[in-house]
Amino acid sequence: MRLGVLDVGSNTIHLLVVDAHPGAQPLAATSTRRLLRLAEHLDADGAIDAPGVAALTDAVAAAAAAAEDAGAEQVLAFATSAVREAVNGEQVLDHVERATGVRLQVLSGTAEADLTFLAVRRWFGWSAGRLLVLDIGGGSLEVAAGLDEVPDVSFSLPLGAGRLTRDRLPGDPPAPEAVREARRHVRQQIASRVRDVTRAGTPDRVVVTSKTFRSLARLCGAAPSEQGPAVRRELRLADLAPWVPRLAEMKVKRRCELEGVSAERAPQLLAGALVAEAAFELLGVQEALVCPWALREGIILRRLDAIGADARLLDGAGAGAL
Protein backbone atom coordinates (compact mmCIF):
# COMPACT_ATOMS: atom_id res chain seq x y z
CA MET A 1 0.00 0.00 0.00
CA ARG A 2 1.05 3.60 -0.47
CA LEU A 3 1.08 5.74 2.68
CA GLY A 4 1.69 9.44 3.09
CA VAL A 5 3.06 11.11 6.21
CA LEU A 6 2.53 14.85 6.56
CA ASP A 7 4.80 16.36 9.19
CA VAL A 8 4.11 19.94 10.31
CA GLY A 9 7.18 20.99 12.26
CA SER A 10 8.42 24.26 13.65
CA ASN A 11 10.53 24.92 10.54
CA THR A 12 9.06 22.99 7.65
CA ILE A 13 6.09 21.04 6.44
CA HIS A 14 7.26 17.76 4.93
CA LEU A 15 5.28 15.19 2.97
CA LEU A 16 6.78 11.73 2.66
CA VAL A 17 4.97 9.14 0.52
CA VAL A 18 6.15 5.53 0.83
CA ASP A 19 5.30 2.11 -0.51
CA ALA A 20 4.85 0.09 2.64
CA HIS A 21 3.59 -3.29 3.80
CA PRO A 22 3.59 -4.93 7.24
CA GLY A 23 6.89 -6.68 7.83
CA ALA A 24 8.66 -4.94 4.94
CA GLN A 25 10.95 -1.93 4.79
CA PRO A 26 9.08 1.25 3.76
CA LEU A 27 10.43 2.53 0.44
CA ALA A 28 10.20 6.24 -0.31
CA ALA A 29 8.20 7.11 -3.42
CA THR A 30 8.14 10.92 -3.19
CA SER A 31 9.26 13.52 -0.71
CA THR A 32 8.36 17.21 -0.78
CA ARG A 33 8.94 19.96 1.74
CA ARG A 34 8.12 23.60 2.17
CA LEU A 35 9.83 26.08 4.48
CA LEU A 36 7.19 27.35 6.87
CA ARG A 37 8.99 28.62 10.00
CA LEU A 38 5.74 28.37 11.89
CA ALA A 39 7.46 29.12 15.21
CA GLU A 40 8.30 32.59 13.90
CA HIS A 41 4.59 33.28 13.54
CA LEU A 42 3.94 33.12 17.28
CA ASP A 43 2.82 36.48 18.64
CA ALA A 44 3.59 37.96 22.04
CA ASP A 45 0.77 35.95 23.62
CA GLY A 46 2.01 32.65 22.21
CA ALA A 47 -0.66 32.37 19.49
CA ILE A 48 -0.03 31.58 15.84
CA ASP A 49 -0.79 34.81 13.98
CA ALA A 50 -3.09 35.19 10.97
CA PRO A 51 -0.31 35.06 8.35
CA GLY A 52 1.00 31.90 9.99
CA VAL A 53 -2.42 30.26 9.93
CA ALA A 54 -2.84 31.19 6.27
CA ALA A 55 0.60 29.86 5.35
CA LEU A 56 -0.04 26.62 7.24
CA THR A 57 -3.42 26.14 5.59
CA ASP A 58 -2.00 26.70 2.11
CA ALA A 59 0.87 24.30 2.78
CA VAL A 60 -1.40 21.55 4.10
CA ALA A 61 -3.74 21.93 1.12
CA ALA A 62 -0.80 21.68 -1.31
CA ALA A 63 0.60 18.65 0.50
CA ALA A 64 -2.78 16.90 0.50
CA ALA A 65 -3.06 17.47 -3.25
CA ALA A 66 0.47 16.15 -3.78
CA ALA A 67 -0.32 13.02 -1.74
CA GLU A 68 -3.43 12.42 -3.84
CA ASP A 69 -1.44 12.89 -7.05
CA ALA A 70 1.10 10.35 -5.78
CA GLY A 71 -1.64 7.79 -5.20
CA ALA A 72 -1.47 7.68 -1.41
CA GLU A 73 -4.27 5.56 0.04
CA GLN A 74 -3.97 7.19 3.44
CA VAL A 75 -2.23 10.27 4.82
CA LEU A 76 -1.05 10.33 8.43
CA ALA A 77 -0.95 14.04 9.26
CA PHE A 78 0.59 15.33 12.46
CA ALA A 79 2.00 18.47 14.05
CA THR A 80 4.71 18.90 16.66
CA SER A 81 5.91 21.59 19.05
CA ALA A 82 4.91 24.81 17.25
CA VAL A 83 1.22 23.85 17.11
CA ARG A 84 1.37 21.86 20.36
CA GLU A 85 2.49 24.89 22.35
CA ALA A 86 0.45 27.59 20.62
CA VAL A 87 -2.31 28.95 22.84
CA ASN A 88 -4.69 28.89 19.87
CA GLY A 89 -3.57 25.47 18.66
CA GLU A 90 -7.03 23.89 18.69
CA GLN A 91 -8.56 26.78 16.77
CA VAL A 92 -5.77 26.55 14.20
CA LEU A 93 -6.35 22.81 13.80
CA ASP A 94 -10.09 23.38 13.34
CA HIS A 95 -9.47 26.06 10.72
CA VAL A 96 -7.06 23.88 8.76
CA GLU A 97 -9.50 20.97 8.82
CA ARG A 98 -12.41 23.10 7.58
CA ALA A 99 -10.31 24.55 4.77
CA THR A 100 -8.47 21.41 3.65
CA GLY A 101 -10.30 18.40 5.03
CA VAL A 102 -7.09 17.32 6.80
CA ARG A 103 -7.12 16.91 10.57
CA LEU A 104 -3.65 17.29 12.02
CA GLN A 105 -2.97 15.15 15.07
CA VAL A 106 -0.77 16.84 17.66
CA LEU A 107 2.02 14.67 19.04
CA SER A 108 3.32 15.12 22.55
CA GLY A 109 7.06 15.52 23.03
CA THR A 110 7.24 12.08 24.63
CA ALA A 111 5.40 10.53 21.68
CA GLU A 112 7.91 12.16 19.32
CA ALA A 113 10.78 10.65 21.28
CA ASP A 114 9.13 7.21 21.40
CA LEU A 115 8.37 7.09 17.68
CA THR A 116 11.82 8.30 16.71
CA PHE A 117 13.32 5.63 18.97
CA LEU A 118 11.20 2.97 17.24
CA ALA A 119 12.49 4.09 13.84
CA VAL A 120 16.10 3.99 15.01
CA ARG A 121 15.66 0.56 16.58
CA ARG A 122 14.21 -0.86 13.36
CA TRP A 123 17.00 0.69 11.29
CA PHE A 124 19.84 -0.69 13.38
CA GLY A 125 18.14 -3.85 14.66
CA TRP A 126 18.40 -5.76 17.91
CA SER A 127 22.14 -6.33 17.53
CA ALA A 128 22.67 -2.64 18.30
CA GLY A 129 21.92 -3.39 21.95
CA ARG A 130 20.94 -0.60 24.33
CA LEU A 131 20.36 2.65 22.44
CA LEU A 132 20.53 6.30 23.36
CA VAL A 133 18.78 8.42 20.72
CA LEU A 134 18.98 12.21 20.36
CA ASP A 135 16.90 14.30 17.96
CA ILE A 136 17.13 18.09 17.60
CA GLY A 137 14.07 19.58 15.93
CA GLY A 138 13.03 23.14 15.32
CA GLY A 139 11.20 23.49 18.62
CA SER A 140 12.50 20.75 20.88
CA LEU A 141 15.18 18.21 21.71
CA GLU A 142 13.95 14.61 22.07
CA VAL A 143 15.88 12.06 24.10
CA ALA A 144 15.10 8.35 24.43
CA ALA A 145 17.04 5.39 25.76
CA GLY A 146 16.41 1.69 26.20
CA LEU A 147 16.91 -1.88 25.09
CA ASP A 148 13.58 -2.69 23.41
CA GLU A 149 11.40 -1.02 20.78
CA VAL A 150 9.71 1.04 23.49
CA PRO A 151 12.33 3.11 25.33
CA ASP A 152 12.84 2.84 29.07
CA VAL A 153 13.07 6.62 29.31
CA SER A 154 11.96 9.30 26.87
CA PHE A 155 11.38 13.02 27.17
CA SER A 156 11.37 16.29 25.31
CA LEU A 157 13.08 19.57 26.20
CA PRO A 158 12.31 23.02 24.70
CA LEU A 159 15.73 23.22 23.06
CA GLY A 160 14.94 23.18 19.37
CA ALA A 161 17.36 24.96 17.06
CA GLY A 162 14.70 27.31 15.72
CA ARG A 163 13.34 28.17 19.16
CA LEU A 164 16.78 28.93 20.61
CA THR A 165 17.74 31.05 17.62
CA ARG A 166 14.56 33.09 17.86
CA ASP A 167 14.45 33.49 21.63
CA ARG A 168 18.10 33.60 22.70
CA LEU A 169 20.42 34.22 19.77
CA PRO A 170 19.34 37.45 18.06
CA GLY A 171 21.74 39.26 15.77
CA ASP A 172 23.93 38.22 12.88
CA PRO A 173 26.16 37.10 14.39
CA PRO A 174 24.73 37.09 17.92
CA ALA A 175 26.57 38.97 20.66
CA PRO A 176 29.06 36.92 22.69
CA GLU A 177 27.01 37.57 25.82
CA ALA A 178 23.92 36.12 24.15
CA VAL A 179 25.86 33.02 23.08
CA ARG A 180 27.16 32.49 26.63
CA GLU A 181 23.67 32.88 28.08
CA ALA A 182 22.17 30.50 25.50
CA ARG A 183 24.91 27.96 26.27
CA ARG A 184 24.21 28.25 30.00
CA HIS A 185 20.46 27.81 29.45
CA VAL A 186 20.92 24.74 27.25
CA ARG A 187 23.23 23.05 29.71
CA GLN A 188 20.96 23.70 32.67
CA GLN A 189 18.03 22.17 30.82
CA ILE A 190 19.90 19.03 29.77
CA ALA A 191 21.65 18.62 33.14
CA SER A 192 18.26 18.48 34.86
CA ARG A 193 17.49 15.19 33.02
CA VAL A 194 20.90 13.49 32.95
CA ARG A 195 20.02 11.25 35.88
CA ASP A 196 16.94 9.96 34.05
CA VAL A 197 19.13 8.89 31.14
CA THR A 198 21.84 7.26 33.25
CA ARG A 199 19.21 5.21 35.09
CA ALA A 200 18.37 3.58 31.75
CA GLY A 201 21.83 2.04 31.67
CA THR A 202 24.99 2.57 29.67
CA PRO A 203 24.16 2.62 25.95
CA ASP A 204 25.85 0.22 23.57
CA ARG A 205 25.25 2.68 20.77
CA VAL A 206 24.42 6.39 20.65
CA VAL A 207 22.41 7.53 17.63
CA VAL A 208 21.50 11.00 16.41
CA THR A 209 18.88 11.86 13.86
CA SER A 210 17.19 14.89 12.26
CA LYS A 211 18.32 17.46 9.73
CA THR A 212 20.21 19.49 12.32
CA PHE A 213 22.38 16.56 13.38
CA ARG A 214 22.88 15.52 9.76
CA SER A 215 24.06 19.03 8.88
CA LEU A 216 26.47 19.05 11.81
CA ALA A 217 27.80 15.63 10.87
CA ARG A 218 28.34 16.75 7.27
CA LEU A 219 30.12 19.86 8.54
CA CYS A 220 32.42 17.58 10.55
CA GLY A 221 33.28 15.40 7.58
CA ALA A 222 30.51 12.82 7.22
CA ALA A 223 29.60 11.55 3.76
CA PRO A 224 27.20 13.69 1.69
CA SER A 225 23.59 12.62 1.22
CA GLU A 226 24.28 11.77 -2.44
CA GLN A 227 26.11 8.64 -1.30
CA GLY A 228 22.84 7.17 -0.02
CA PRO A 229 21.26 6.43 3.37
CA ALA A 230 23.11 3.17 4.03
CA VAL A 231 26.56 4.79 4.22
CA ARG A 232 27.91 4.86 7.76
CA ARG A 233 27.97 8.42 9.10
CA GLU A 234 29.29 9.53 12.47
CA LEU A 235 29.39 12.70 14.54
CA ARG A 236 32.29 12.99 17.01
CA LEU A 237 32.45 15.44 19.87
CA ALA A 238 36.13 16.09 19.13
CA ASP A 239 35.19 17.24 15.62
CA LEU A 240 32.12 19.22 16.68
CA ALA A 241 33.53 21.19 19.62
CA PRO A 242 35.95 23.37 17.59
CA TRP A 243 33.12 24.40 15.28
CA VAL A 244 30.97 25.94 18.04
CA PRO A 245 33.06 29.11 18.61
CA ARG A 246 33.67 29.41 14.88
CA LEU A 247 29.93 29.30 14.12
CA ALA A 248 29.29 31.85 16.86
CA GLU A 249 31.45 34.38 15.02
CA MET A 250 30.03 33.72 11.54
CA LYS A 251 27.32 35.64 9.78
CA VAL A 252 24.53 33.54 8.29
CA LYS A 253 25.78 34.28 4.78
CA ARG A 254 29.13 32.68 5.64
CA ARG A 255 27.47 29.64 7.22
CA CYS A 256 25.58 29.07 3.96
CA GLU A 257 28.92 28.58 2.23
CA LEU A 258 29.94 25.71 4.55
CA GLU A 259 29.95 22.15 3.28
CA GLY A 260 26.55 20.49 3.68
CA VAL A 261 24.80 23.53 5.17
CA SER A 262 21.63 24.71 3.42
CA ALA A 263 20.36 28.26 3.42
CA GLU A 264 17.34 26.95 5.31
CA ARG A 265 19.43 25.54 8.18
CA ALA A 266 22.24 28.10 8.30
CA PRO A 267 20.49 30.58 10.63
CA GLN A 268 19.89 27.84 13.21
CA LEU A 269 23.19 26.00 12.92
CA LEU A 270 24.83 27.67 15.92
CA ALA A 271 21.88 26.84 18.17
CA GLY A 272 21.92 23.25 16.98
CA ALA A 273 25.66 23.00 17.63
CA LEU A 274 25.24 24.37 21.16
CA VAL A 275 22.59 21.77 21.94
CA ALA A 276 24.51 18.90 20.35
CA GLU A 277 27.75 19.76 22.13
CA ALA A 278 26.00 20.12 25.49
CA ALA A 279 24.09 16.85 25.09
CA PHE A 280 27.25 14.96 24.15
CA GLU A 281 29.31 16.38 27.00
CA LEU A 282 26.69 16.09 29.74
CA LEU A 283 25.60 12.59 28.70
CA GLY A 284 29.16 11.37 28.29
CA VAL A 285 28.96 10.81 24.53
CA GLN A 286 32.14 10.91 22.47
CA GLU A 287 30.66 9.80 19.15
CA ALA A 288 27.30 8.90 17.67
CA LEU A 289 26.01 7.26 14.53
CA VAL A 290 23.66 9.20 12.27
CA CYS A 291 20.39 7.44 11.45
CA PRO A 292 18.51 8.34 8.24
CA TRP A 293 15.18 7.33 9.81
CA ALA A 294 13.41 9.52 12.35
CA LEU A 295 9.92 10.58 13.41
CA ARG A 296 8.15 10.20 10.05
CA GLU A 297 9.44 6.68 9.60
CA GLY A 298 8.47 5.86 13.18
CA ILE A 299 4.89 6.91 12.47
CA ILE A 300 4.82 4.76 9.33
CA LEU A 301 6.20 1.75 11.20
CA ARG A 302 3.69 2.14 14.03
CA ARG A 303 0.86 2.32 11.49
CA LEU A 304 2.11 -0.77 9.66
CA ASP A 305 2.34 -2.65 12.95
CA ALA A 306 -1.31 -1.79 13.63
CA ILE A 307 -2.36 -2.91 10.14
CA GLY A 308 -0.48 -6.18 10.57
CA ALA A 309 -2.06 -6.80 13.97
CA ASP A 310 -5.55 -6.17 12.57
CA ALA A 311 -4.89 -8.59 9.72
CA ARG A 312 -3.76 -11.30 12.14
CA LEU A 313 -6.87 -10.83 14.23
CA LEU A 314 -9.06 -11.24 11.16
CA ASP A 315 -7.15 -14.34 10.11
CA GLY A 316 -7.57 -15.77 13.59
CA ALA A 317 -11.29 -15.08 13.56
CA GLY A 318 -11.62 -16.80 10.21
CA ALA A 319 -9.66 -19.83 11.35
CA GLY A 320 -11.81 -20.10 14.44
CA ALA A 321 -14.94 -20.02 12.36
CA LEU A 322 -13.66 -22.92 10.26
Image: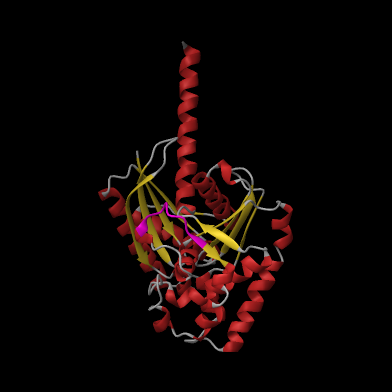
Tell which residue pokes out farthest to the top in this image.
322
Give the vertical position of 53 relative to 30 (above or below): below
Residue 157 forms part of the magenta stretch: no
Residue located 74% across and 60% down the image = 195
Q: Is residue 132 above or below residue 211?
A: above
How many numbered marks, from 0 up?
0
Residue 45 seen in the figure: no
Residue 99 lies left or right of residue 291; in this view the side is left
The image position of residue 296, as x and y in percent, is 45, 52
Residue that extends furthest to the left in the rendered view of this protein: 69
Expressed as whole percent of the image width and height from the top left, the position of residue 125 reads 53, 43
State the residue in front, 5 or 100.
5
The N terminus lies in which quarter of the figure? top left
Tell which of 306 and 206 is nearer to you.
206
Relative height, residue 254 to residue 11 (above, below): below
Q: Nearer the viewer, residue 103 or 219?
A: 219
Q: Position of residue 89 (x, y in %)?
A: 50, 62
Seen at 39% across and 55% down, the residue is: 97
Q: Main secondary structure of the magenta part?
A: loop
Q: How is the image coloured?
A: secondary structure
| Residue 81, image x, y percentages | 53, 63
> Is residue 209 rendered to the left or right of residue 15?
right
User: Residue 71 falls in which quadrant of the image?
Assistant: top left
Q: Which residues are magenta?
A: 227-234
Foreground residue among 37 and 222? 222
- Does any portion of residue 279 appear in the rendered image? yes
